[in-house]
Image (spheres, rainbow, N blue to C red):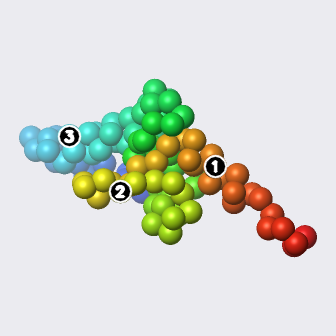
Amino acid sequence: MGLIKRQRSSYLAALRRADNGDCGALGELIARAMEDNLNRFIVPNIAGPARLVPLAALADEEFSLAALRQAAQRGRLKAVQGADGIWRSSRKSVEAYRASKHQRPAGRG
């Protein structure tokens, strides 16, 4: 499960509540961790390079979700925002954005 350090206190509190018969908070934490892992690791690998997936599924060490969202909003990353408010792009588009970030502008250098 992908519980990260910043969620540790919430996780421990949820465990204490579950020990007292209230499993709601623990269930929510587990469900959110499962969804995050699904979006980050499974969806991008089965979707194919050109298939649109949520930006959360495309974030990595170089580009956080916030950075990808900002690039999409500024038109630097080819992406679409659905009626649900979620931005979607493809691995292919993120790779094109990555390549453009590493290119040096002509005339400089």
Which residue corresponds to the image point at 69% horizontal and 60% vertical from the top-left? 101
Residue type indicated by callout 1: Ala
Residue 92 visible? The answer is yes
Q: CA distance from mark 1 to mark 3?
A: 38 Å
The numbered mark at residue 27 is 3
Q: Are marks 2 and 3 in contact (CB under 8 Å)?
A: no
In the picture of the structure, the residue carrying the numbered disc 2 is 81
Identify the mark nearer the N-term, 2 or 1: 2
Looking at the image, which residue sits at the far top? 46
- Dot placed on the residue nearer the N-terminal end, 1 or 3: 3
- The residue where tag 1 is placed is 96
> As drawn, which residue projects farthest toward the left?
21
Task: Identify which residue, 6 or 68, lies in the foreground.
Answer: 68
Label 2 sits on a secondary structure element that is: strand
Residue 4 seen from this side? no
Image quadrant for the C terminus?
Answer: bottom right
**Crowding near pointer 2: few (<14 within 10 Å), some, many (20+)?**
some
Label 1 sits on a secondary structure element that is helix
Residue, far right: 109
Indicate the position of residue 85 as horizontal and vertical percent values: 29, 58
Above or below, 9 against 23 in this view is below
Towards the viewer: 109 or 30: 109
The three-letter amino acid code for the residue at tag 3 is: Gly
Question: Seen in the image, is 50 located left or right of residue 26?
Answer: right
The mark found on residue 109 in the picture is none
Residue 47: % across, % down: 45, 31
